[in-house]
Amino acid sequence: MSNTALLERPTATAAVRTTASAPATAPLDADLPAVRSPRGFALYVGLDEIKAAEAGVSLPLLVDALRRTLAELAPGAETHATVALAPHGSGGRDLDVVRLALHEPGAIARTKAAAEEETTDEEGGVVVDISRKRVLIDGESAAFTYKEFELLQYLVLREGRTIERSELVSALWQAQDDETPGERTIDVHVRRLRAKLGRYEDIVRTVRGIGYRFDRHADVVIRYGHGTPSPDRF
């Protein structure tokens, strides 16, 4: 059985449709067994017709060869071939286009996350981007030093917990560092950090006599990276 998937627009939010109607399926979480086991696999191949021709083959020929090989190795296996189509000259890696057009979960998650990032960058508030080690304030990149970002990141990753000054010193400075601060010197670093946060300085709160705490605020977005699991297992 074969089918064709069409990537209608070469954008991050491109709509995807198939040329053959698919039967209705039950919700993914409906009556699923407690233990799951593999039922098959998908092999995504990024190769356009021009590159295939340069290699002396064609897409139908490759599909047929793969099917014959599978039939020899596992005669009882069922196969389903789908070709992903995209507008001519749309750009992008062939494999990325295929995975997105065929609704591969990891590709969809990354595309959605990228679109959300673009939207967030244009909005106000604070974006603490752990994955890229940067801070955006009202859409502009803030000039944080390495140590200032490390300090903010340490608090952010322990949201809601009061961190003692001694813990910040031991966690962010090595004993052999020439500029290892005393516990009270941490206050200076925090003041500089707050100054750069501007009107959002209250996201880093002082707990009198103990230390500091990061409190999530409606105007603060934390990006931890795109670690969305992908079913790539081979």
Image (tube, rainbow, N blue to C red):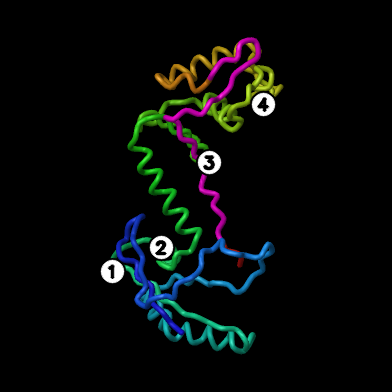
Q: CA distance from mark 4 to mark 1?
A: 53 Å
95 or 138: which is nearer to us?
138
Q: Name the residue rendered at 44%, 86% in the picture.
A: 61
- SS at circle 3: loop
Q: Residues within 10 Å of mark 2 (few under 14, many from 20)?
A: few
Residue 16, quarter of picture:
bottom left
First-in-chain label (4 vs 1)? 1
| Amino acid type, label 1 | His
Residue identified by numbered label 4? 171
Q: CA distance from mark 2 to mark 3?
A: 25 Å
* 81 is higher (above) or lower (below) than 106: below
First-in-chain label (1 vs 2)? 1
First-in-chain label (2 vs 4)? 2
Q: Which residue of the protein is positioned furthest toward the left in this rendering? A: 88
The boundaries of the magenta stretch are 205-230
Residue identified by numbered label 1? 88
Q: Name the residue rendered at 56%, 83% in the picture.
A: 78
Residue identified by numbered label 2? 93
